[in-house]
Image: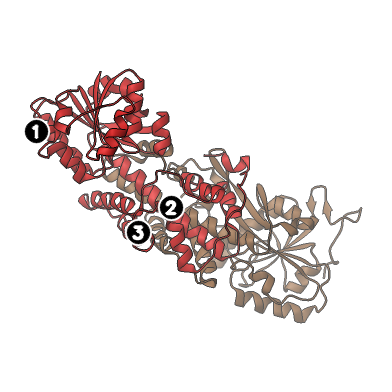
Amino acid sequence: MRIGVIGLGSMGAPMARNLVAAGHEVRGFDIAPEKLAAATACGIAAAESAAGLAARCELLILMVWDDDALRDALFGPAGICSSRQLPQCVVDFSTTSVALAHEAAGVLRQRDCVFLDGAVIGGGAAAAQAATSPIVVAGDRATYDRYLPTFARLGRCDYVGAQGHAKVVKLINNLLVGVVTAANAEALSLGLALGVELPQLVDRMRASAGASRVLDSYMGRYVAEGRYPEGLIGHRLMAKDLRLAAELAESMDCAVTYPRFGEQMYATFGRVLGDDRPFPSAFEYFRRMSSVEATAPRVPLEFSDQGRSGR
Amino acid sequence: MRPRRSRNSSGDAVTPSGLAHVGLVGSGSMAHAVMLRLARSGAQVHALDPAQRAVDGDDGEPCASLAALRDCTEVVVALLEDPVRAQALFASDARGAADATGSVVLDIGLMPPGLAYQLQWPRGVRVYEGALGHQLDGAGIVPALYIDADALAEPAIAWVARTLADRVVPIAGRGRAKAIAAVEGLLMGVNAAIVREAATLGAAAGIPFATLMPLILKGSGATAMMPLEAESWTAETAHSCDPESLREGVVRAFDAARRVSHPLLFGTIAMGVLAHRAAESQPARGWREPTPRHRASAA
């Protein structure tokens, strides 16, 4: 199958490579020339524009930065819709708004192109490379079923229903990730202030009802290795994701507090620590707030089996 | 007055079925639950209620003072909440018995971490801290007791600890058991609150939580609190995880945070979300029939 991939960053590039490995003819496009060059070195043919890609493939996958980037890729002067010929299906895995997913579906439907909204809801770049990312897709069921074998090359897929629902799941997942991460940062900082060492705290929390995947993945890694995992988004992007969740809630008059609060907190973390610092570094913000010096781990920890089980 | 520290025929404080006599200081539903657990494990519970409420005759025998309580029991379990009240209680105890050599007290109440060690106890009293918490066990959670590791060297406390919780977690370092429980309470409260908001948002967008949760559990936003909303908790732990109990956990973290001037921003929002949830879900899961003691208190 001829497949196009727009957006060849830390998630889009490994997805494209997995499709090449599955025997598909893959073309890619990215507005950043260096990313496009890196992709071509991996067997991905370079397209000159999104429009050029649209005319040459049956399935087009989008993995771009935000709503503006998606709008540009779809409706810009050299965007997909400027092409005379469109793919049969466009699927967007970017973290973008529900409203834009509906808008894109409506515009493409008029040109006999099916738009599916999708999302990668975990695993990060490593899982994208291993094709083990949890993926959700929403929209026309028959089209989903038709392309499921291809999607299955990208990760573990679930169909989640009506148009827009994959974006909703993604925004809720990122809302949980953002808030739980910051709450972990706050709680662990409190534990430090109370005299408990970070390794002991993390070890105990991982086995407790306060456990979470972000505690395992981010704080656990930080404690064990003294650094955050590679490829994490920064405070600015996390604030953007939480803003999208807040806008979704407000569009439905849904009374929730954490999305806007979280957006403001991550904007603050960005101002204090740097917009592009990995978002779990919110921990450093709370340490500064409480003037607590963390006990830096000197040796990697071996967490108990009890701590790993139960989730 | 009962004979000091009744012993079994072999002279051991700890019998094969448990302790003969255990003291309990505290009031409220938590103290009542502790009393029930101890009584059901075979201990004779002697209770001192600082709030001067009635003590259930079936569950424990009322005791007039802390000194008297110490005198007739092997170990005293204290659920202390307010440092000022606690100090007043123990000051009167100190006046009643200047030498209390051999007395063992385990405080598992809501006082901030380390405070029990700082109170002025009668000479000879050995004091330890612990705190009730929740540990993961497969897909569910079980009641746990975080406890000062030194305390487990005391056979009487080791027995009480095993009685109070399914899992006893020794914590090295004085005051850390309660600190860890405070952190756990904060995380449980915030995680429950954000899961609640996620469920609300999903439902508004047309995705029921029963559909949403299995998806999120595969994703990076998974938390151990998610099954709470799916009602998969056991009956026993449901009481610990109802909105009011979760709020109590966050309050415990606030009390601890205040002592070290640590801000709790996400905890503050959790208090509001859990209060709203408690108000709209009464009677909450885990709600229990009032005990005779509760009814007496209300009267």
Earlier in the chain: of badge 2 and badge 1, it is: 1
Left or right of B161? Residue A96 is left
Earlier in the chain: of badge 3 and badge 2, it is: 3
Q: Chain of mark 1?
A: A
Q: Chain of mark 2?
A: A
Left or right of A250? Residue B242 is right
Q: Which residue is mark 3?
A: A270
Q: The residue under label 3 is which amino acid type?
A: Gly
**Where in the figure is residue A254, as x and y percent of width and height?**
26, 52
At 60% from the left edge and 60% from the top edge, which residue is drawn? A196
Out of B187 and B244, give the one closest to the viewer: B187
Cα–Cα span, label 3 and label 1: 37 Å
Color used for chain A?
A: red
Q: Is residue A133 visible?
A: no
Color used for chain B?
A: brown
Seen as rendered, the residue at the extreme bottom is B95
Residue A280, numbered circle: 2
Seen as rendered, the residue at the extreme right is B10
